[in-house]
Amino acid sequence: MMTYDGFKALEITRSGSVLTVTMNHPPLNLLDEILIPDLKRFVRTVATDDGVRVVVFQSAVPDFFAAHVDVRYGSDPEGFAELSKDDAGYDGLLPLQHLVMSIRALPQVTIAKLRGFLRGGGNEFAMAADLRYAAADETWLGQIEGRLGIIPGGGGTQLLARAVGRSRALEAVLSADRYDTRTAELYGWITRAIPAADLDRIVDDLAQRIGSRLPTQIRAAKAAIDPTTGAERLYEDLRVEASALAHVYPSRADVEARLAAALADGMQTPGNESELEEFLDRH
């Protein structure tokens, strides 16, 4: 049986054919030089684990599923590019795009169990999962990049458009607003909003039920139920997103200065991240 050891920010447990990946990188589960490489290494490993049929991603950090990509990369493109150093395949993709593409290509069913805040890259990571279940009234989602002077560069434009349609994706990307579970469920952004007290039980039961299916059934279902022409189309569309991001990243000097001031004033701390949209509007 394949083992999963040596991760800095992931706790991984197995129950039959279901693997649960718990992100534990306080205080925010920030997607940075610790969490992103851990997630990439995990995905590379599980892709070849024939004993796993379902992967559940969840958070151990109170109030945050995964905050977003570390904003410090806004003025550090070299450091951002370093996150791709161990990537293989999918040439031309940015670091988070590669992670998203790799998750989408997994032979297993992936489930994101959502509680707390997930914005930007945190939302893009969740959007890469096949299924997304959120604690009702305790989960908030958004693509915050519009307030940071850029656009999503981790698959957000492509994955949101596939899930919610063109106009709602444009709304989310350009408004950079925070969405509650009622709206996210209405839009099709999440699979379902579940009463918070029932989330663990319902997701765990569903994961075990799917895990009882034959691997060939799972692969066949994933191949057949696809809103586009499959992984090759998503790969090409992510390359389009990467090209579009180049128009706004690296950030302009005035944007870098504003973000530096926001970081100095407490951005990427739990209190300010809980009302990040309002915090950024003040800066």
Image (cartoon, rainbow, N blue to C red):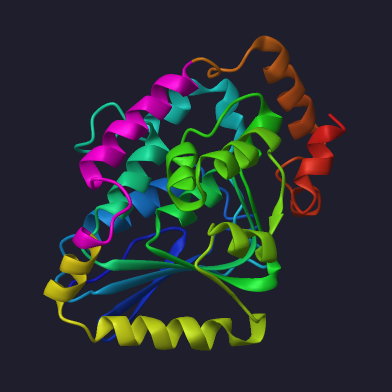
Magenta region: 223-246
Task: Classify the position of the N terminus by image quarter.
Answer: bottom left
**Residue name at image x 63 percent, y 42 percent:** 172
Q: Quadrant of residue 282?
A: top right
Q: Name the one closer to the observer, 224 or 72.
A: 224
Tell me where residue 113 appears, x and y as whole percent.
51, 70
Residue 244 lies in magenta, yes or no? yes
Location of residue 173 in the rendering, given as x and y in whole percent from the top left corner: 60, 37
State whether residue 198 is above or below residue 72: below
Front residue of 196/29: it is 196
Residue at 34% in and 61% down: 6
The image shows residue 246 at horizontal and vertical percentages of 47, 17
Residue 61 visible from this viewpoint: yes
Residue 99 at what x, y percent from top left? 35, 46
Where 242 falls versus 128 (above or below)? above
| Residue most extreme to the top | 253
Residue 231 drawn in magenta: yes
Q: Is residue 113 left or right of residue 119?
A: left
